[in-house]
Image (spheres, grey):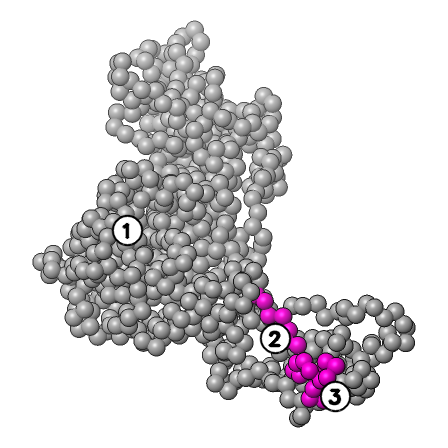
Amino acid sequence: LALRKKMTKNNKSKFNASTTEDDSDDDDDDDDEVEHGKRQRLDSELSEASTAPSRKMSTQSESSEDNFRPPSYKPADTKLYSDVAEKLMQKMGYKEGKGLGKRGQGIVEPIQAFKQEGKRGLGLKIPYLDVETYKWDSKEEVIEPEESYTWLRGADLPSLSDSEMESWMEEGEKKLSIDNESKFCSPNLLKNVLQCKTVFDEMDGDKFFRARNRSNPFELIKNGPFLNRAAMKMANMDKRFECMFTNPVRENKSSLLGADQLLYFADVCAGPGGFSEYVLYRKQWRAKGIGFTLTGSHDFKLDDFFSGPSETFEPYYGVKENGDVYDPENILSLHQFVLKSTKGQGVHFMMADGGFSVEGQENIQEILSKRLYLCQFLVSLFIVRTDGHFVCKVFDMFTQFSAGLLYLLYRSYRQVTIFKPNTSRPANSERYIICKWKRPDCNAIRDYMFKLNKRLDHYSATSKRDIVSCVPFSILTSDEQFFDYLVTSNNIIAERQVVNLAKVKAFYIDPSLTEPQQASLKEECYRLWEIPLTARKSSHQRPEELFSSITGNQGNRWIDDVVSHEDQLLHRPSDLGVMNYVCDWHYVVMGSAPDKSPPAFYLGLGKHAIYRYRKDTHKWTIDTSLNIQLSPGTLLYGETVEEFKGQGAAQVKLKTFHIIDAFALGDRDISRMHYTMRIKVIKMKNGSTKLGLDMGDGQFSEATGLIFIKATKDPWIRSLSRSHNKKYFNNPTTKVSTYDLVPEACASFTECMKNRRLWTWEFGCGMKGEDPASETPVLHKRQLCSVIHEKNKK
């Protein structure tokens, strides 16, 4: 019996790929060395005898379902055992075709291998999951590193009016099933998708996830250097659509960004923030994000933004302060907040990645998500500027309500497409609606969708009635371009989903199956999307290390030449001799007290980690008094200032930070730009030259002096052309003159810092109306103005 059982195991293991039993010999009773040697030879012969059925199984697994049958045992036609095994069994009384009992009774067929699946109950049989119904053909799978897509253009259609949409909303009995929702897809494909999903509901969870991960060709892409997989989805879509999000353009190919303008974006229903981390990784501080998501465990995890600077990202949770996108008041307050933050224009693009658990109700995920679809679409019409873009995650698009929402987007943006990125697992129903170039005439659609959302407030989760349609079926079908596009898209994605669900099923049944292209596809996609193949890690540099990196490993020398350089004061009239050409010089009003808190060098390590270089200790010391954030890698020269707002008892005092000059902002080295250009970039980053403060009317600070900065590099001179009333650059050595701003004439940040001059407003300087002091000569404002006028005459 032991030998019979062993032979059965060696043969049967080739027919049931899900069997994971240990094939070691369990017969430990015979210690005889001769018998042990015979059994080893027997094992070898039995293993060879079982090879042919294994190949047969592999071939049949690629045939049609109707023709597939597991090989059966036929003792009369098939030699199951080797000659040695038969002789041994005959000695024990075995006769072909009879059982092993004393009188030939007992089973004739080999003992069946153990088929228990995980923790399922004994005897549980899952429909469509048996080996006999296994079917997957690798030839049906489509693998494209660069996905195909088609735009649906609605730009040429007239705008919709309030009166036209007034009667479109239709209410009726709430739908709790999509089994019959085949108006916008093939009925057979819908049936197959739902049937496949039902099968997977019964599978062992851990084993299913392992099968899914092994079967997905793009699984190894994972999250890359970002906090989650959503960031890689955004990288995938951004690059596939020619950087339409991180470098948006109008239909005429002109840039949607103005000169020295930040890229404004919104991330809605998108905690923990993977989409935003990617955009900030790509644009760094040159992008400003506004986030809106549920508070609590679903909030943005800004501290986990390792690849992009979260300092330029601002979460907002609506007037209710809960981040509920369903709430009409939250939507309106978000609209106002975005307009205020973008100078009334709106964001350049909006991303939405909302979703929630539908465990046990996967087949009706679309129905459960209908209001989420609606509100995300609605918010885009409120906050995206004209010619801006929108991307939103959806799932199935089979119902008339979903089709109607897509139609409204189609009439609100010039082009839309339904896109399934490679980073979205092929076996699920996830897809993204991508909209390009928002139309200026879609306010009526926005108001209609707002009305739909307010109406949905009247229906509870247990209500038997619902809004079943937002656009009449006759309207949807009369636009043949739209109708054909939606049907084709649904069919393509459903067909792909069925193929990949069958693949997951095959990998579930046979744990030995693997996807050989995973590693190569990962490398190819990272190359296409320009993402480094590096592990995700946080940066914990010391200020000295970061400073050395920013200055090109010249940290100590730079400190000696620039940081530790003593401020040169314009204390007496004779000190004005350095100002031979006044057009070379620029000035900044100083608001700090030179004897208490003079301007200093500041280094940002990210968020509130800001270090100030102290000349007395020659060390970078963290400054906890600053309630501001700086992107990591920011090196600047500035001062802390007390500003005031209001008068008398109602006056408010605020501590602010003024930027005078900057060497680097985040990842961008601006040290070699002309000083005026550096100031423009600084203003671009912060909206003003003051960090952490929204400057309002009536706000002021007490001036304590002027800082003069020589922005022209020797030997160049900047002068004013009398004939053209325009400034030009002249090189006395080479006799070259030009109106253009040439790099050779621009003093770098280092040179500007070395040559800076400070005029402090001490008593006797004339700023309070006093005359020049005779006892202790101090540079008086009349003397300064006289020198400037005299130089200008020349």
> Foreground: 175 or 729?
175
Residue 153 appears left or right of 287: left
Residue depicted at 66% across the width and 83% down the height: 108
Say which residue label 3 marks: 95
Say which residue label 2 marks: 16
Q: Is residue 99 magenta?
A: yes
Instruction: Give the amino acid type for the residue marked by disc 2 in the picture.
Output: Asn
Q: Residue furthest left?
A: 163
Can see residue 677?
A: no
Count of numbered tags? 3
Instruction: Give the amino acid type for the residue marked by disc 1 in the picture.
Output: Ala
- Tag 2's secondary structure? loop
Q: Nearer the viewer, mark 1 or mark 3?
A: 3
Determine crowd level at label 2: few under 14, some 14-19, many 20+ residues with C-alpha closer than 10 A. Answer: some
- Tag 3's secondary structure? loop
Instruction: Give the amino acid type for the residue marked by disc 3 in the picture.
Output: Lys
Q: Nearer the viewer, mark 3 or mark 2?
A: 3
Residue depicted at 69% across the width and 82% down the height: 105
**Of pointers 3 and 2, the one earlier in the residue sequence:** 2
Residue 583, percent across and down?
38, 35
Find the magenta span and give its range. Answer: 95-117
Could you tell me if the residues under marks 1 and 2 are in contact, i.e. CB atoms within 8 Å?
A: no
Between the C-alphas of marks 1 and 3, the distance is 69 Å
Residue 126, percent across and down?
48, 69
Residue 690, percent across and down?
38, 32
